[in-house]
Image (tube, rainbow, N blue to C red):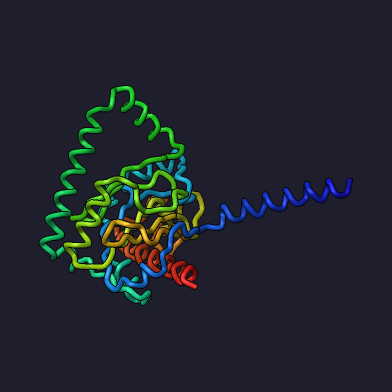
C-alpha cells in the first residue's frame, strides 16, 4: 500500500515539474554554437509585429475585454511605426551587448540599393498575396471575422507588419512554436538574398508576436502603461539554415507613459516603441549568454 502511494506521489511530482518546465518562460529550440560563433556581421532583416499594437493583459494570451477592443481603435495601424523604431533601437542595443557579432544599422540596410531591390520586390509580392487572399474570402467569412473582432476573445492570427521599407512573412500563430521563422519558401528566399546583398554572415529574424501595451501601475485601465511581449528570435546562415532559435518574454519595460482607459498617450507611444526594442535586445542577450555556457 505504501509503495502504491509512493508511486502516485512520484507521478504527481513529475507532473508538477513538467508543468513548471512548460511555463518557465523561455526555451532554446536550436543553438549551433560553432556556427553562430563564426558569424562576425549580421543583419536584422525581419522584425515582424502585429499591425496594431494594442492593450493585452498577458502578451502570451491575446485576450481582451470590450473596453480594450474600443481602445484599440485609437491605435489602429501603428504597427509599422512600432516595428521601425523597435528594430532600430534593438539593433543599437544588440551591438552594445557585445555578443560576438555586429549587427549592421537600420540606416546602412536602407541605404543599400541591392537590398532595397530585394525588399521592395517582396513587399509588392506580399501585398498581392494578401489582396488575393482577401478577395477569396466569402461574405460569411468576412462577417464572422468582424463579429469575432467586436465580441472580444482571443485573436489567433493577427496581421503582421514590418519596419518601413521591409517586408514581413506573417506572425507566429502561437508563441509556443519556438521559432521566428514561419516556414515558407519565400521567406527563406528573401533571407538568403538579403544576406548576400548586405554582405553579412547571417540574418537575425525577430517575430514579436506578443508586442502589446501593458499595465505597469493602473486601476481600471488608467494609470501608468508600458509595453510587454512574448517574442521569437532566430539566426539564419547564408544557406538558409536556422542555427539559433529561441523564445522569450518580458513583463513591462523600463519606459512608461500615461494611460487612460487602456489608451496610451499618443505623444508617448514613440518612446515606448524605442524602449521596447532596447528591452527585447537585453532580454535576448541574457538568454543568449545563459545558453552559451
Q: Is residue 225 above or below residue 56?
A: below
Q: Position of residue 285 (x, y in %)?
A: 42, 69
In the image, farthest residue toward the right: 1
Q: Quadrant of residue 21?
A: bottom right
Q: Position of residue 151 (x, y in %)?
A: 43, 33
The residue positioned 28% from the left and 70% from the top of the image is 103
36 or 58: which is nearer to us? 36
Question: Does residue 99 appear in this view?
Answer: yes
The residue positioned 56% from the left and 57% from the top of the image is 24
Q: Is residue 176 above or below residue 99?
A: above
| Quarter of the N terminus within the rendering | top right
Q: Position of residue 259 (x, y in %)?
A: 41, 55
28 or 141: which is nearer to us? 28
Q: Is residue 144 above or below residue 278?
A: above
Horizontal relation, residue 131 to residue 61: left or right: left
Q: Position of residue 79 (x, y in %)?
A: 29, 51
206 or 197: which is nearer to us? 197
Horizontal relation, residue 68 to residue 128: left or right: right
Question: Does residue 76 appear in this view?
Answer: no
Count of labels shown?
0
The residue positioned 32% from the left and 73% from the top of the image is 101
Amino acid at each position: 500500500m505504501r509503495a502504491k502511494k509512493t508511486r502516485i506521489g512520484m507521478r504527481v511530482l513529475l507532473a508538477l515539474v513538467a508543468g513548471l518546465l512548460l511555463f518557465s518562460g523561455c526555451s532554446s529550440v536550436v543553438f549551433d554554437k560553432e556556427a553562430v560563433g563564426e558569424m562576425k556581421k549580421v543583419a536584422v532583416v525581419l522584425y515582424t509585429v502585429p499591425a496594431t499594437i494594442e492593450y493585452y493583459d498577458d502578451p502570451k494570451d491575446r485576450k481582451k475585454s470590450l473596453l480594450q477592443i474600443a481602445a484599440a481603435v485609437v491605435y489602429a495601424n501603428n504597427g509599422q511605426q512600432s516595428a521601425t523604431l523597435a528594430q532600430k533601437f534593438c539593433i543599437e542595443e544588440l551591438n552594445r551587448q557585445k555578443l560576438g557579432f555586429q549587427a549592421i544599422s537600420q540606416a546602412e540596410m536602407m541605404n543599400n540599393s541591392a537590398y532595397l531591390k530585394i525588399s521592395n520586390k517582396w513587399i509588392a509580392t506580399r501585398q498581392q498575396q494578401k489582396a488575393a487572399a482577401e478577395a477569396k474570402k466569402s461574405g460569411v467569412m468576412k462577417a464572422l471575422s468582424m463579429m469575432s473582432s467586436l465580441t472580444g476573445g482571443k485573436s489567433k492570427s493577427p496581421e503582421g507588419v514590418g519596419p518601413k521599407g521591409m517586408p514581413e512573412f506573417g506572425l507566429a500563430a502561437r508563441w509556443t512554436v519556438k521559432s521566428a521563422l514561419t516556414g515558407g519558401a519565400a521567406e527563406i528566399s528573401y533571407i538568403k538574398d538579403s544576406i548576400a546583398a548586405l554582405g553579412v554572415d547571417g540574418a537575425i529574424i525577430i517575430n514579436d508576436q506578443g508586442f502589446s501595451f501593458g499595465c505597469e501601475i493602473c486601476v481600471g485601465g488608467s494609470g501608468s502603461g508600458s509595453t510587454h511581449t512574448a517574442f521569437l528570435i532566430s539566426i539564419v546562415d547564408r544557406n538558409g539554415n536556422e542555427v539559433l532559435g529561441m523564445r522569450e518574454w518580458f513583463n513591462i519595460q523600463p519606459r512608461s507613459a500615461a494611460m487612460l482607459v487602456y489608451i496610451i498617450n499618443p505623444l508617448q507611444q514613440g518612446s515606448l516603441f524605442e524602449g521596447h526594442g532596447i528591452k527585447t535586445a537585453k532580454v535576448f542577450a541574457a538568454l543568449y549568454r545563459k545558453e552559451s555556457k
